[in-house]
Image (cartoon, rainbow, N blue to C red):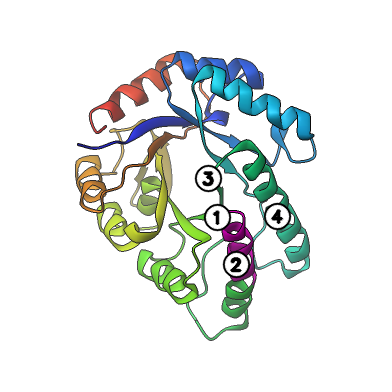
Amino acid sequence: MSQRKIGIRLDSLRGRPREVLALAAELEMEGVEINCMQGEFTPAGLDRQARKAVVHFLEDLQLELVSLGADTGFRFEDESRIDEFVEKSQQALDLALDLQSPFITMAIGGLPEDKGSDRYELISTVMQELGHDAANRGLAIALSAGMESPESLNEFLNGLDNDGLKVNFDPANMIVFGHAPADAVATLGAHMVCFRARDARKYLDGSAEELSLGEGDVPFDDVIDALNEIEYERFLLIAKAPQEEQREAIETARDFLRRYE
């Protein structure tokens, strides 16, 4: 029997931090992902005492901290910001350790097709070092998948052979970038630590739109079967833009996912 749980990315809800955490618990979420790059949960905004208070508040609500969202907006095309990216990533890892989050998530842009290029080597070097920093803390960095092929990302991670580098899987990203989500799960399964529950539709003109779960092109039955095959027993994490009727929207997403717990 699957041990998967349902959680939510906190910025899917509108409101003050403590209010939306309480709302997440009220909506029967079992865990949350918190964005630590802006708002009230940044490394700079939480001193030691405040970090302990967050841990206790989550415990009181019986919410697990699934992960910290640590996407700085950095992409490796902008080499002038590498030092800033590394410093912010290390700060996020320290915060994750204090808040008892097992990993942080981030996007770094797509991998170059040319594995012999300077940029591919640069990405490999920087992420190898950050992965070791994460592993030395007993944590991991989960990279967003989709911009490159699942096979390319799998080859990249296998080549680094770094316990501190994992995959944050988003089936909607797979649709947007033209990959088959269920096949991608099979390819990346050994590295997956997080599953973003999102849906999307891609149109013939190349444009794409995020839709409610079950209303887009993600074949969820096939994707969940693939998750079962790789024995994925971590969170299914609701992630969507906040809506006016946010309670109804999250309840609908939650009930959709409960079919697959």
Q: Please, what is the dominant secondary structure of the magenta stretch?
A: helix
Give percent across and percent down for residue 244.
52, 17
Amino acid, disc 1:
Ile
Q: Which numbered disc, 4 or 3, marks the residue that appears first in the sequence?
A: 4
Marks 4 and 1, how far apart in space? 10 Å
Badge 1 density bin: few <14, some 14–19, many ≥20, Cα 10 Å: many
Residues under numbered marks 1 and 2 in contact, where contact means CB atoms less than 8 Å apart: yes
Q: Secondary structure at mark 4?
A: helix
Determine which quarter of the picture holds residue 150.
bottom left
Residue designated by label 1: 141
For disc 4, the marked residue is 90
Q: Which residue is mark 3?
A: 102
Which amino acid is tagged 3?
A: Pro
The residues bearing labels 4 and 3 have C-alpha atoms spaced at a distance of 14 Å
The amino acid at mark 2 is Met
**Does residue 136 belong to the magenta stretch?**
yes
Marks 1 and 3: in contact by CB < 8 Å? no
Amino acid type, label 4: Gln
- Disc 2 marks which residue? 127
The C terminus, quarter of image:
top left
Mark 1 vs mark 2, CA separation in Å: 9 Å
As measured in the structure, the alpha-carbon distance from the residue carrying label 2 to the one carrying label 3 is 18 Å
Which mark is first along the chain, 3 or 2? Answer: 3
Residue 93 lies in the magenta-colored region: no
* Residue at left offset 47%, top offset 58%: 166
Query: Which portion, as a residue range, is magenta?
Result: 126-141
Q: Is residue 126 above or below residue 109?
A: below
Q: Earlier in the sequence, mark 4 or mark 2?
A: 4
- Report whether residue 206 is seen: no
- 9, 181: nearer the viewer: 9
